[in-house]
Amino acid sequence: PESGVVPPLGSPDYSREELVAEMGAALLCADAGISCVTIENQAAYVAGWLKVLEEDSRAVIIAAAQAQRAVDRILGRQPEVG
């Protein structure tokens, strides 16, 4: 988190961060040609994500954008200026 404070396990903020992390991992795996075989582990987070997504329909779009920014930073890519 930007504040440096880790949200409590199971909280909506924790679920949002996990959604961003899982999306980022999926993007990195796709970029590296690694098949993602951890479906069982990812499924454990779905309940938390669903609550967040029910409360904020934009959460998945926001999480995807944050994940892409993180992946771009990890891979040393410059953001496109449009």
Image (cartoon, rainbow, N blue to C red):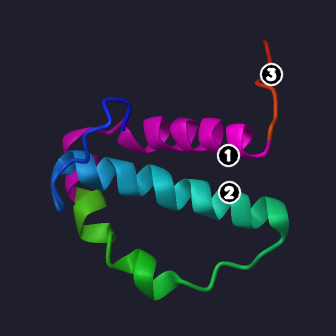
Residue 37 lies in quadrant: bottom right
Badge 1 amino acid: Val
Secondary structure beneath label 1: helix
Q: Main secondary structure of the magenta part?
A: helix
First-in-chain label (3 vs 1):
1
Q: Which residue is mark 3?
A: 80
User: What is the quadrant of the N terminus in the image?
Assistant: top left
10 Å crowding of disc 1: few (<14), some (14-19), many (20+): many
First-in-chain label (2 vs 3):
2
Q: Which residue is mark 2?
A: 27
- Magenta residues span 51-75
Q: Residue at x 76, y 24 (%)?
A: 79
Secondary structure beneath label 2: helix
10 Å crowding of disc 3: few (<14), some (14-19), many (20+): few
Q: Give percent across and percent down for residue 34.
A: 77, 75
Q: Which residue is mark 1?
A: 71
Badge 2 amino acid: Leu
